[in-house]
Image (spheres, rainbow, N blue to C red):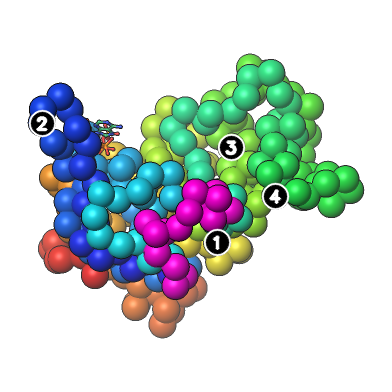
Amino acid sequence: MYELTQVTRNYQKGRRTVSAVRDLSLTVDDGEWLAVQGRTGHGKSTLLHLLGGLDRPSSGSIDFDGRDLSGLKETQLTRVRCESFGYVFQTFNLVPTLSAAENVEAALVPMGIRGPERRRRVGAALESVGLADRMRHVPTELSGGQQQRVAIARAIVKEPKVLLADEPTGNLDEETRDDIVNLLEKLWLERGLTMILITHDSSVAKRAQRVGVMKNGNLSILRDSRRAERRRPEQRKAVAPEGEPEPAS
Ligand SMILES: Nc1ncnc2c1ncn2[C@@H]1O[C@H](COP(=O)(O)OP(=O)(O)OP(=O)(O)O)[C@@H](O)[C@H]1O
């Protein structure tokens, strides 16, 4: 799915060059769930933006399903973003004047999906996040957890291959956090998504198949239970103790 080779993303801060991501090489399997932890300012969001085609590397390549994202023209990249990637953010990023259904629908407009098919997909997406009865509510009429569910519906309504989530539970209380992680896991399993999730919360990260830590722009893998899970998927939740760091692969 993803093959990152020696990816670096530099930013200019006055005269100083900051390498937010530095010489990072990483492979992400089709259908895997990778959690990324790390202290603030160590490049997690920058990595997620690069994976989602929202930003381009200063050097190195990001191969996604056989295409180097860094070499695509803007129109091609927009298309890949639109069709293949769903995004979920800490602050939900819903349009305040639009209803839940309209917020979800907005993701389908650039894809040219119209009429009854659009309505069907919006209804199904809101139903799959448990909000079929809140379609006409605007964000201020919804709780934080419900707003994040709308944002998740907006991400999955496109039927993307990849779900990229930046601190999706960062603004939620513990109980709501667990509900949202359960929902993300259900969608990941049901839809065969590749899921890459940034979190400061170890109790969220431990639910993933693979956990990495970003430090100074590079990623070290702390735990990898993909092989064990492939053998015994029904025991997924039973696998897991944290291991020693090893280089990203
Ligand atoms: N657009 C930008 N322009 C300049 N510097 C940036 C930009 N985006 C990120 N940086 C810098 O790159 C470094 C990594 O930032 P990034 O947001 O990726 O970290 P992070 O690990 O996601 O942090 P947090 O947990 O606080 O979100 C920081 O030093 C940040 O100031």
Mark 1 burial class by Cα count in 10 Å: few <14, some 14-19, many 20+: some
Q: Split into 4 quadrants, where in the image is the N terminus? A: bottom left
Q: Which residue is mark 3?
A: 151
Residue assigned mark 1: 161
Extent of the magenta region: 65-79
| Amino acid type, mark 2 | Arg
Q: CA distance from mark 1 to mark 3?
A: 16 Å
Q: Amino acid at mark 1?
A: Lys
Inspect the image, locate mark 3, and give the three-letter code of the amino acid beneath it: Ala
Could you tell me how far apart the alpha carbons at marks 4 and 2 are, in whole angstroms? Answer: 40 Å
Is label 1 or label 3 in front?
A: 1
Residue at the image position 76 percent from the left and 44 percent from the top: 122
Image location of residue 34, percent across then percent down: 36, 58
**Which residue does the numbered mark 2 point to in the structure image?**
16
Q: Nearer the viewer, residue 193 or 110?
A: 110
* Residue behind mark 4: 111
Cβ of mark 3 under 8 Å from ligand 1: the answer is no
Give 51 or 177, whichever is nearer the viewer. Answer: 51
Image spot of residue 175 (x, y percent): 47, 35
Specify few, some or many for label 2: CA neighbours under 10 Å numbering under 14, 14-19, or 20 or more. Answer: few
| Residue sticking out furthest to the right | 116
| Quarter-of-image position of residue 135 | top right
